[in-house]
Amino acid sequence: MRRIFRRQARKGFAGHIPPILQEANLAFDKGEYGRAGELFEQIAQTADARGGPRAPLFHLQAGHARIYAGQTALGIPSIKRGLSLLAERQQYQRLIQARRRVLAEFKERGLNEEAAAIDAWLKSISPESSEIDTQIPPSKKPVLPTHCPQCGAALRPDEVEWLDAVTAECGYCGSPVREEDS
Ligand SMILES: [Zn+2]
């Protein structure tokens, strides 16, 4: 199993992981949030300029890094850009999850006014939340490795794209990731 997966992964992806992405993920993991924010902002702008499918995630990650770094004012534009791209592209499932995470993080840090402002803004640009809240994500998911073996991104089970029942796609580099052999 493992050998097959490695071969597939290598065929499609090895050599195509941008070093800046690995660097950004590493900085984030080490708690160097200001640095991670800077790097993700660059990655996000590049992806955004060419309409890349991962631009929303990169913007959001830039925003999260800035929030973790205590740089709220720098983080909010990235978060808004990420959320509005998801709304524009009608990726409502992702939008719900991203909104949930953003609001929880803001409230955890006592940023209640900012959370309320973002939520109000989001309601003005996207459909009724009652409409999108009814979508239920798949319930049973395999356990993924904590980090993408290709680019080093932390993998959040609710943020990856599931290709089939056991394979997810890393949202940052597009590599397929499978449940770890136990
Ligand atoms: Zn990856």
Image: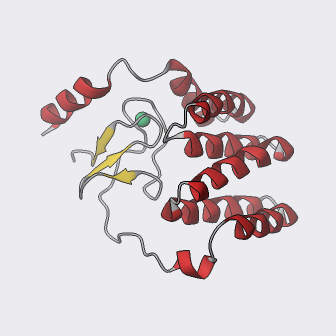
- Position of 49 relative to 112 (above/below): above
Q: Nearer the viewer, residue 107 or 174?
A: 174
The count of marks equals 0
The quarter of the rendered structure image containing the N terminus is: top left
Q: Splitting the image into 4 quarters, where does residue 118 fall? A: bottom right
Instruction: Name which residue lies at 62% across and 76% down.
Output: 129
* Drawn side of residue 84 relative to residue 175, left or right: right
In the displayed structure, would residue 135 be above or below residue 20?
Answer: below
Q: Is residue 148 rendered to the left or right of residue 52? A: left
Q: Please report the residue visible at 60 percent of the width from the left and 29 percent of the height from the top.
A: 43
Q: Is residue 102 above or below residue 123?
A: above
Q: At which x and y percent is residue 84? A: 66, 54
Relative side of 70 to 130, left or right: right
Q: Nearer the viewer, residue 8 or 45?
A: 45
Q: Ligand 1 lies in which image quarter?
A: top left
Q: Give percent across and percent down for residue 67.
A: 76, 47
Which of the 4 image quarters holds residue 99?
bottom right
Horizontal side of 7 relative to 64 (left or right) equals: left
Say which of 36 and 121 sits in front: 121
Indicate the position of residue 2 as horizontal and vertical percent values: 16, 36
Residue 48 occupies which quadrant of the picture? top right
Q: Position of residue 82 (x, y in %)?
A: 64, 48
Residue at horizontal 57 percent and vertical 66 percent from the top: 96
Q: How is the image coloured?
A: secondary structure
